[in-house]
Amino acid sequence: MMHYPQVLFQNRKPDRIATLEEYRQSGGYQALADVIRNYTSKKVQEVLVDAILLGRGGAAFPAGRKLMTVADEAPYPRYIVCNADEMEPGTFKDRVMIHADPHMIIEGMVIDAYGAKAEKGIIFIRPEYESAARILEREIEIARKEGFLGKNILGSDFNFDIAVHRSAGRYICGEVTAQLNALMGKRANPQQPPPYPTEKGLWNLPTVLQNVETLANIPHIIKNGAEWYKSLALTESGAGTKLFSVSGKVNNPGCFELPMGIKLSEIIEIHAGGMTEGSEYKACLPGGASTRFLPREFYDIELDFDTLRDVGHRLGTGAIMVFDQKTCLVAATLNLVEFFARESCGWCTPCREGLPYIRDLLRRLERGQGEEEYIPMLQQMSKHLWSAYCAFAPGAVSPVESLVTYFEDEIREHISQKQCPFK
């Protein structure tokens, strides 16, 4: 088996979290000390831009550029929000990261705050992650006592503190503006910018929202440099490592830290232990439920934001859900659409009305009640959902669009046999 550098998981233990002492022995909080002694906020931003740190929550927006959109003359206090909502089906990397090395996330937040001249930090975490929330609260208090958080961090004039906020629990809360509305006690509906959150976010003040995995990368980039970070990837367009959550028909499901640009086939065959006995690879969702099926023709594709985008796909969160030849992808897509139809905030018509409509068509197909006309209807309705208010609906129909694109024959079998051919 190929052994790759472990950056985010360097202190990962099989049965417990890394302590503050263990984190410091591995170089923890050295980056923060260096930033406070030698960096301006602009320099922090520039290093992250040079490193090509792209957001690991799914959208892949450059983390440094996000900091740069906070204007110098913007009002105070400014906020840093850590998105630990992780409601994307198939995705569990952030939970594993919190349970592995919480101080790496805390240090990343503090450095991010320095880059935005922010004073207040909030970790927005899903309610099912209660153990992770308690870990974070405990370790935040430890960091505060050691001078890494609170007033006059490491003897400087920089002040920043973090609170943990438990979400009420909805998928839409993972969307940036919906999450900010939820934090303010409002209904978690998305808002179309402008203004952007970095201009007017929480309580109309500048707010930078980053994913757990994104923040955990920041101390290592500061400590080792942008060129080192880019050298970790296996593709020229990539940078850093990626946490891949692998589930489905594999022998060794789990969360793996691997280089950006690694081949899908290597992840499945080597790190995830290969397909289960009697199973053959049919397709996967490469980045969670809101990405498109990757059929066999993409089995050897390099998993990088750019390489997937170039062939009309998205890396998303890096949650690889593997399906075999015995899996009905009509049923799998129906299962996903039922989730999305339930989780829609109902704010706009395409999402509110379109998803239940698509769900009904897929249900009829799966029950053997499908008609030939359902295929163009699925295509047409999927296009309509791209007119929705936010990115929720286009993501929700990504499996549907790719089902029709790559597995139309399977849909037709449901129609011609008047039943699911896999039952």
Image (spheres, rainbow, N blue to C red):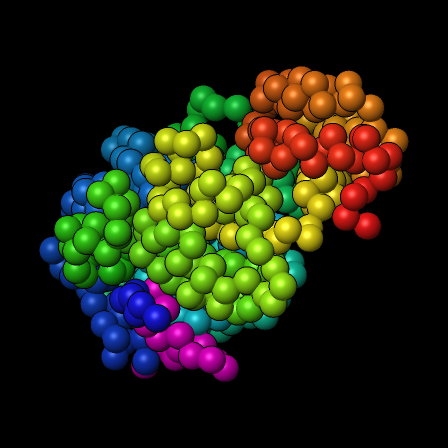
Task: Judge whether 410 appears above or below 247 on screen.
Answer: above
Q: Percent x, y for residue 11? A: 35, 75
* Residue occupying image coordinates x 40% and y 38%: 308
The answer to whether 25 appears left or right of 400 in the picture is: left
Of helix, strand and loop, which mostly describes the magenta segment?
Answer: loop
The answer to whether 283 appears left or right of 52 in the picture is: right
Viewer-nearest residue: 313 or 136? 313
Q: Which residues are magenta?
A: 8-21
Q: Percent x, y for residue 65? A: 29, 36
What number of labels is visible?
A: 0
Q: Percent x, y for residue 27? A: 23, 72
The answer to whether 13 appears left or right of 281 in the picture is: left
Residue 127 picture quarter: bottom right
* Residue occupying image coordinates x 68% and y 43%: 329
* Residue occupying image coordinates x 23% and y 56%: 232
* Residue occupying image coordinates x 40% and y 74%: 12
Q: Percent x, y for residue 32? A: 23, 61
Task: Judge whether 321 appears above or below 96 on screen.
Answer: above
Residue 310 picture quarter: top left
Res. 114 in view: no
Viewer-nearest residue: 372 or 144? 372
Report if residue 18 lies within the magenta region.
yes
Res. 330 in view: yes
Report if residue 196 lies within the magenta region.
no
Task: Judge whether 249 appears above or below 387 on screen.
Answer: below
Q: Quadrant of the N terminus?
A: bottom left
State the residue lying farthest toward the left: 38
